[in-house]
Amino acid sequence: MADYNWNERHLINFENNNALYTNDLHVFYGTKEAINGIDMQFQKNKITALIGPSGCGKSTYLRSLNRMNDTIDTARVTGEIMYEGVDINAKNVNVYEVRRRIGMVFQRPNPFAKSIYENIAFPHRQAGIRKKAELDEIVETSLKQAALWDQVKDELQRSALAISGGQAQRLCIARALSVKPDIILMDEPASALDPISTMQIEETMQELKKDYSIIIVTHNMQQASRISDYTAFFYTGDVIEYDETLKIFTNPTCKSTEDYVSGRFG
Ligand SMILES: Nc1ncnc2c1ncn2[C@@H]1O[C@H](COP(=O)(O)OP(=O)(O)OP(=O)(O)O)[C@@H](O)[C@H]1O
């Protein structure tokens, strides 16, 4: 690897219209520091891609944004995660409400072993919605938003375990959307999918950003350059360069970013 200056930073700052931002965010697994104090702001109604070599902390950072790292015993998160004027990393915050407002879609589609309909209706029924018409409406709206309705509307009782991987991922997106989040975190949502399903997910994301802010971890440079408005290049727990996607992929400031996006290392 070339001799890069890893102390170099080139980070974009937004004055307004932030969906979320972090101040001095650190994440530790036991004594090991995986995120070294990241200040980063995410724009509303935009897609922001997090890229970087394996193990540099993209997923750890993403998971901290809706307190998913709370589910890992050894993980400890310090610093602020500011959302709507509230530090959602504070102790007294309702974590379930945080995860409702800031939803997550994982790498591998993880539908429940229930029907397509129930995958979406079940959490709402658990939350107290009993009227069938109301549940029907939630199911239909969410499936439409995830561009899956037309394909499954006549087989809503089919098992969600018997649909294709691409459909299952869109069902998981529909499930995440059904609770009306503001922000959607996506951790390599298409990496387990074939190219056509990947393209469909990317098209769906372009539609979704009209109503949601999206933050996506991806290993796929073409995908990041196709779909995102902003891109952040992570390296060993830090953000080295964060800028408009076009700039990152055509004229990055840091040599390390340039070499990473052009496939010279990583
Ligand atoms: N549950 C965990 N316990 C301990 N260490 C962890 C855990 N999860 C991640 N790590 C470590 O934290 C660092 C960052 O990992 P993370 O998965 O966030 O990186 P990443 O950039 O998302 O990697 P990849 O692209 O391979 O998914 C790595 O050194 C990893 O080994």
Image (cartoon, helix red, strand yellow):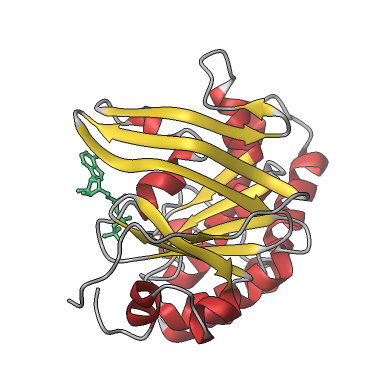
Query: Relative to 127, does residue 54 appear above or below in the rendering?
Result: below
Picture quadrant where residue 70 is located: top left
- Camera-side residue of 262 and 166: 262
Left or right: residue 237 versus residue 226 is left
* Coordinates of residue 255 in the picture (x, y in percent): 37, 77
* Coordinates of residue 95 in the picture (x, y in percent): 54, 25
* Coordinates of residue 27 in the picture (x, y in percent): 35, 35
Left or right: residue 68 versus residue 34 is right
Query: Relative to 195, does residue 157 appear above or below in the rendering?
Result: above
Query: Relative to 53, does residue 26 appear above or below in the rendering?
Result: above
Residue at the spot 25% in from the left edge and 56% down from the top edge? 55
Residue at the spot 57% in from the left edge and 35% down from the top edge? 99
- Camera-side residue of 136 and 230: 230
The residue at the far top in this view is: 92
Residue at the spot 50% in from the left edge and 75% down from the top edge? 224
Left or right: residue 131 versus residue 89 is right
Query: Relative to 261, does residue 42 appear above or below in the rendering?
Result: above
- Camera-side residue of 129 and 198: 198
* Coordinates of residue 58 in the picture (x, y in percent): 38, 54
Residue at the spot 73% in from the left edge and 34% down from the top edge? 84
Left or right: residue 79 versus residue 27 is right
Question: Can the viewer see residue 127?
Answer: yes
